[in-house]
Image (cartoon, rainbow, N blue to C red):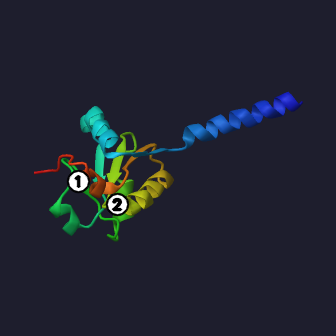
Amino acid sequence: MKFFSKCIIFICTLLWASNVAAQTKLNPTAFENMLKTLGSNAQLIDVRTAEEFVLDRLENAQNLNLRDSDFKDRLKALDKTKPILVYCAAGGRSLKTMEMLTKFGFKEIFELEGGINAWIEQEKPLAK
């Protein structure tokens, strides 16, 4: 009986783990490599304000301002079958966004650790 109970618990744990989103923080180099690897399959999201976005941003990023009233609706409209790469200035807003995306059922979510500030500090390329 104990063996059976342990098997049931193990199977339930595996099923739960398979439904949990893969939330991964990536340093700027790993984030850059992930962007290159995924190419057009990636959904690159900048969750800063429009004013911040026009100053500096990553190539092919779309701006979804966390502070906009329709932010959650715009997140829900993203393609759940494609990986999402998200960043902000330093990591606070992108962390909140990752939590929301997980609640909305997204499975592959990658965050730029340290935000665009870390990206710039490491002299990674910006959109022209």
Residue 93 horizontal side relative to residue 128, left or right:
right
Identify the residue shown where x is 48% and y is 51%. Answer: 102
Residue positioned most to the right: 1
In the depicted view, which residue is nearer to us: 116 or 54? 116
Q: Secondary structure at mark 2?
A: loop
The picture places residue 42, in percent across and down from the top left corner, at 30, 41
Name the kind of residue labelled 1 in the image: Ile
Q: Quadrant of the N terminus?
A: top right
- Amino acid type at image mark 2: Ala
Residue 5, above or below 65: above
User: Would you name the residue on which mark 1 appears?
Assistant: 120
Q: Residue furthest left?
A: 128
Say whether residue 124 is visible.
yes
- Position of 116 with respect to 83 (left or right) is left
Q: Nearer the viewer, residue 35 or 120?
A: 120
The picture places residue 71, in percent across and down from the top left corner, at: 35, 64
Q: Earlier in the sequence, mark 2 or mark 1?
A: 2
Circle 2 residues within 10 Å: few <14, some 14–19, many ≥20: some
Q: Which residue is mark 2?
A: 90
Residue 13 in picture, x, y percent from top left = 67, 38
What secondary structure is marked by label 1?
Answer: helix
Let me know if residue 78 appears in the view: no
* Quadrant of the rendered image containing residue 62: bottom left
Q: Residue at x 28, y 41 (%)?
A: 32
- Percent across and percent down for residue 56 are 18, 58
Q: Judge from the rendering whether residue 90 lies leftward or rightward of residue 96; answer left or right.
A: left
Q: Would you identify the image quadrant in which residue 24 lies?
A: top left
- In depth, the one of 65 and 115 nearer the eye is 115
Inter-mark Cα distance, 2 to 1: 11 Å
Neighbour class for label 1 at 10 Å: few (<14), some, many (≥20)? some
